[in-house]
Amino acid sequence: MKRLITCLFLVGFANYLYSQNIGIGTATPTEKLDVNGSINLNNQLKINGDSGKANQALMKDASNNLVWSDLSEFKNIQIFDCPNFAGVAGTNNCSATWGVPAGVTTILVECWGGGGGGGNCSGGGGGGYASARLTVTPLTTASITIGAGGNFGNSLNDGIAGGNTVFSVGAAVLNAYGGGGGSKFDITAANPGVIAQPLGGTFLVSGITSGFIGYYGSPGGISKHTFVQVSATEFAKQIEYGGGGDAATLPNSGSKGGYKIVSASINHLVLATQSGIQPGGGGGADGTWGFYGKGGRVIIRW
């Protein structure tokens, strides 16, 4: 009888403990295990039997549950550039394909159009920009066109527009258009001193309705013509040639324009920097010809 009573007591006490909160350092625990103080753990911390993988952190998911997860959603990167120059607008672009790796269902893509070539009156426009977070199917193939940089112009010809960059996978298409070509020096009786400022490239996204952004590239800079006095009897003509427009999201990516000062006793010319400095940057202008725009770029992260 005593044994039966003892067994019943133990079962009842175990059920009592099972239904109660346990406190360590607190007399009023509010959780199954409530610790008021530091914890020293010499082995693994498991959540639902899972101790996580290397470089993962403990986070909450959309259902407010604790899970092990990566700090960055996109751990890999691949970059596609185009070193080519276009002597005719729309030509000499670069092409590539990219295979979606097994198990990958989401990617982040950034695109820049090519920079326009500088003329001898204004710099070329910077390339446009488009970016999107895309849902993809593993083992499918993306088609990529990277815009070439525009060729330079001179006193007879405008600079060439930068090429368009296009990324296409499934139904989604990202377009980052190239910047306009710089202007030649073209002052006539019919067009007295009117020079069009080369526009920066634009963007267009189709096949998706959210999860994307886009920006226009900066327009090419117009040359500035002034006079400065260099002595009591002499004035010099001073020209600050227009710089190339910056590619969208890339400050200072356009080529810097040249500088010229001329008088009876002075003849000084500083040429523009050689080409757009960063992908999509427009070429700068100077007194003889402009310089190349920089080709576009595509970055894929997954």
Image: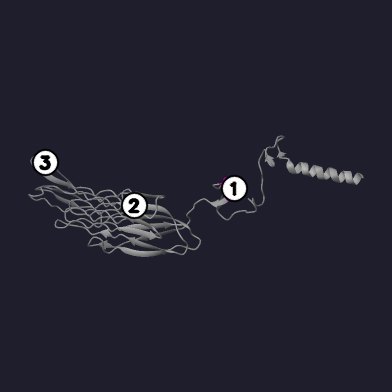
Left or right, 5 with respect to 24, comes to right
Q: Which residue is nearer to you in this view: 257 or 3?
A: 3
Left or right, 296 with respect to 46, comes to left
Disc 3 crowd, CA 10 A, few/some/many (<14, 14-19, 20+): few
- Mark found first going from the N terminus, 2 or 3: 2
Q: Residue at x 59, y 47 (%)?
A: 66
> Which residue, given by chain and number where applicable, does mark 3 sit on?
231
How far is disc 1 from disc 2 in space, using C-alphas?
A: 37 Å
Secondary element under disc 1, as helix, strand or loop, is: strand
> Which residue, given by chain and number where applicable, does mark 1 sit on?
66
Q: Residue at x 91, y 44 (%)?
A: 2
Of the two numbered discs 2 and 3 in the rendering, the one whose residue sits closer to the viewer: 2
The structure's colour scheme is: one colour
How far is disc 1 from disc 3 in space, using C-alphas?
A: 78 Å
Amino acid, disc 1: Leu
Left or right, 208 with respect to 283, comes to right
- Mark found first going from the N terminus, 1 or 2: 1
Residue 215: image location, x then y, percent: 33, 48
> Which residue, given by chain and number where applicable, does mark 2 sit on?
129
Residue 128: image location, x then y, percent: 31, 52
Magenta residues span 63-67
How far is disc 2 from disc 3 in space, using C-alphas?
A: 48 Å
- Looking at the rendering, in which quadrant would you find the N terminus? top right
Residue 188: image location, x then y, percent: 9, 51
Q: Is residue 66 magenta?
A: yes
Residue 256: image location, x then y, percent: 25, 50
Q: How many marks?
A: 3
